[in-house]
Image (spheres, rainbow, N blue to C red):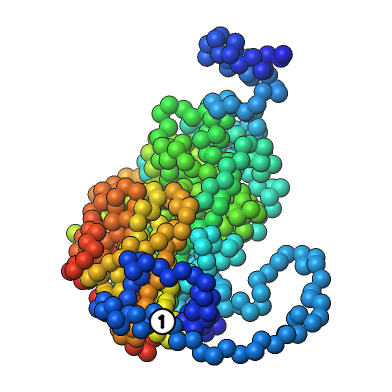
């Protein structure tokens, strides 16, 4: 009988011993709690081209910077065809306006009126825009076009500039407009006979 | 888009023939009449089927000559079923066909499993053609051992198969608005159910070793949207799957080939397709798809965020919008019920717009967070009727009415609509979507 099959005895040796016995035992059947030793180690350098997420605090923002003015030039060549002049009336999502509309009957959700974090703008544009050529903008260009989108929402002056330090500090108007899921907010009732009709 | 044709089963005459040997169901399980429950005498007349004289059966050509040979490399549905296809919503002309959706033909499918070619689609940057040899899933961030897995690596882990529904959070979203005369496919077709096969995410997380401070993970796709969503670690450890197969074959490209995340019972968008990366961290990332989209705006201007679970819901798929009942008498009311909280316990059906209800029969087995088929025979007296279904799940959640939903949420929350669906049956037999 090999060590691998002597489970009762192995168990008596205690948890620590179990780990060492099993990891030395290549023919052991899969047991929960034990890594199988599959997969290839990967380091930060190997992962760099994929590791592009920016979190809500701005962690992950690359070096570089961009101005509103530079951003306007990029916007007018790379974005305007779909998103329209000034971020409005395009065939794709509206990017500007709508502040103060969320509690009305015709809410307009844009970067300026709805998005809680400016970091999301950088993250999204860098990974997915322009739609016809995703991941083609350099970090400086993403900073610049993000600065311009914030500018047309009144959130950055015409001479504004963004970098890794200033972007997370932009206070978005709807920053406190979100609450974590608090359902159930609607409770159905199971009436079977002579109920109040309705749908 | 081909014109809509009602399925052949809707012809009540055909129904009666097929039913020759079936025992008549008990009265309690048999809805009668139109808007009001008809009296016993009227129902008895309807129940006694007036069969038309039959015709002599010919021996058709296909019985007198050989059919096609074997070795059709990949089997296809009969050429007579060409109308059973995914469609974009009627009247919708998506300006960007790669950021669009197609809907499952719910009225024309049977049982509870959606055939792979009919599973609904929602993409944000089209369907990538991913070479499985080159594809990798990387798990990193707050872990002891960042690892990269090939598909071949993942196939060596213990495989898990589970049946679960998948529903887009935006499914039925047009019902927040005034009723449009659409089909069940157009209204509710961002809904499918498959047997999913893959590796338990908990197993993979064991492989990398999760750091104690990790609370969330970011899931990222390899498509041109590089779609990202933040997932609570508890869900990842509880029942999340890294899926490579659906209904017995490798994932279809439009379902995330070669790898997708599957979070049972949660809104479809978070089950990230073409999955390439999972990064563990301490807080949600606040990605575009969990802020700008997939948040539920309420009348006071605040929004509900991280509203992952899909609430209890059901819909009658036959008779349903766009169909026409061809004759009075026996009809089969059938539909689908599901809940992101657990199993379906009961489905009630009303033919009088919600005044009186009868419990429907559930097809077994009833599975956890899977589509459940319900049915109930109905004797249609030719009068107007409004058909509704109402699901109750294993946690006691009862599907609400549309009015209850709107009273609580207004009409602008876009996602998570689970109100009771009403189908009006006109004396002409036409069936339409209504709000009563």
Q: Is residue B44 or residue A126 the one in the foreground?
A: B44
Residue ID for mark 1: B48
Where residue B154 sits, quadrant-wise, is top right
Which image quarter is the C terminus of chain B in? bottom left
Quadrant for the N terminus of chain B, please.
bottom right
Observer-nearest of A174 and B378? B378
User: Measured along the vertical axis of the image, is residue A76 above or below residue A150?
Assistant: below
- Which structural element holds mark 1? loop
Residue B206, position as x, y percentages in the image: 54, 30
Q: Residue at x 45, y 52 (%)?
A: B366
Quarter of the rendering containing residue B297: bottom left
Report the number of numbered marks. Answer: 1
Residue at x-position 46% and y-position 36%: B237
**Mark 1 closeness class: few <14, some 14–19, many ≥20 residues within 10 Å:** few
| Residue B6 in view here | no
Q: Which residue is rendered at x = 69% and y = 41% of the image? A: B152
What percent of the width, then of the height, locates residue B45?
36, 84
The residue lying toward the viewer, choosing from B25 and B179, is B25
In the rendered view, tell whether residue A145 sits above or below residue B209.
below
Image position, residue B227 (x, y; %) = 50, 53
B357 or B246: nearer the viewer: B357
- Residue drawn at x 37%, y 67% is B26
Does residue B414 appear to the left or right of B239 in the view shown? left
Residue B304 seen in the current view: yes
* Chain under disc 1: B
Report x, y in % for residue B406. Answer: 23, 65
In the displayed structure image, the side of residue B67 where residue B215 appears, left or right = left
In the rendered image, the residue lying farthest to the top is: A13
């Amino acid at each position: 009988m090999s060590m691998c099959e002597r489970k009762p005895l192995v168990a008596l040796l205690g948890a620590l011993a179990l780990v060492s016995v099993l990891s030395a035992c290549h023919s052991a059947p899969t047991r929960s709690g034990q890594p199988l030793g599959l997969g290839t180690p990967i380091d930060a350098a190997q992962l760099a081209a994929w590791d592009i997420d920016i979190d809500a605090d701005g962690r992950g923002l690359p070096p570089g910077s961009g101005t509103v003015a530079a951003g306007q030039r990029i916007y007018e060549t790379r974005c305007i065809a779909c998103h329209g002049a000034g971020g409005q009336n395009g065939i794709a999502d509206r990017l500007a306006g709508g502040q103060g509309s969320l509690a009305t009957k015709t809410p307009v959700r844009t970067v300026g009126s709805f998005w809680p974090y400016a970091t999301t703008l950088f993250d999204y544009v860098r990974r997915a825009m322009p739609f016809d050529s995703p991941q083609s903008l350099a970090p400086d260009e993403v900073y610049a076009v993000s600065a311009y989108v914030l500018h047309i929402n009144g959130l950055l002056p015409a001479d504004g500039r963004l970098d890794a330090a200033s972007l997370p500090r932009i206070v978005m108007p709807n920053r406190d407009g979100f609450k974590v899921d608090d359902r159930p907010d609607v409770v159905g009732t199971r009436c079977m006979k002579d109920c109040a009709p309705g749908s | 888009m081909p014109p809509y044709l009602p399925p052949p089963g809707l012809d009540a005459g055909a129904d009666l023939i097929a039913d020759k040997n079936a025992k008549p169901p008990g009265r309690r399980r048999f809805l009668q009449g139109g808007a009001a429950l008809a009296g016993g005498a009227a129902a008895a007349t309807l129940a006694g089927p007036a069969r038309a004289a039959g015709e002599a059966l010919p021996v058709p050509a296909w019985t007198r000559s050989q059919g096609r040979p074997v070795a059709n490399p990949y089997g296809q549905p009969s050429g007579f079923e060409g109308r059973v296809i995914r469609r974009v919503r009627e009247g919708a002309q998506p300006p960007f066909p790669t950021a669009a959706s197609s809907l499952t033909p719910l009225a024309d499918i049977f049982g509870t499993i959606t055939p792979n070619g009919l599973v609904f689609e929602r993409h944000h940057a089209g369907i990538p053609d991913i070479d499985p040899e080159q594809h990798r899933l990387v798990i990193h961030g707050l872990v002891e051992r960042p690892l990269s897995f090939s598909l071949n690596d993942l196939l060596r882990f213990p495989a898990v198969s589970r049946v679960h529904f998948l529903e887009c959070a935006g499914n039925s979203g047009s019902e927040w608005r005034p009723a449009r005369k659409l089909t069940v496919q157009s209204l509710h077709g961002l809904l499918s159910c498959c047997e999913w096969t893959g590796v338990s995410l908990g197993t993979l997380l064991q492989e990398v070793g999760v750091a104690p401070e990790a609370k969330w993970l970011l899931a990222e796709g390899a498509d041109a949207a590089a779609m990202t969503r933040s997932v609570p670690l508890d869900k990842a450890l509880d029942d999340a799957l890294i899926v490579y197969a659906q209904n017995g074959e490798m994932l279809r490209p439009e379902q995330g080939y070669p790898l997708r995340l599957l979070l049972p019972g949660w809104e479809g968008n978070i089950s990230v397709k073409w999955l390439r990366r999972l990064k563990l961290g301490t807080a949600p990332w606040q990605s575009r798809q969990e802020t700008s989209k997939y948040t539920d705006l309420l009348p006071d201007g605040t929004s509900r965020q991280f509203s992952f679970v899909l609430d209890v819901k059901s819909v009658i798929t036959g008779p349903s919008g766009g169909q026409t009942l061809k004759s009075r008498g026996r009809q089969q009311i059938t539909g689908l019920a599901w809940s992101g909280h657990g199993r379906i316990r009961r489905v009630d059906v009303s033919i009088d717009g919600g005044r009186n209800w009868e419990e429907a029969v559930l097809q077994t087995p009833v599975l956890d967070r899977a589509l459940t088929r319900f049915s109930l025979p109905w004797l249609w007296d030719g009068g107007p009727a409004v058909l509704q279904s109402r699901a109750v799940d294993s946690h006691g959640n009862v599907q609400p009415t549309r009015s209850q939903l709107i009273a609580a949420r207004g009409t602008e929350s876009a996602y998570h609509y689970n109100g009771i669906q009403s189908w009006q049956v006109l004396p002409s037999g036409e069936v339409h979507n209504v709000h009563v």
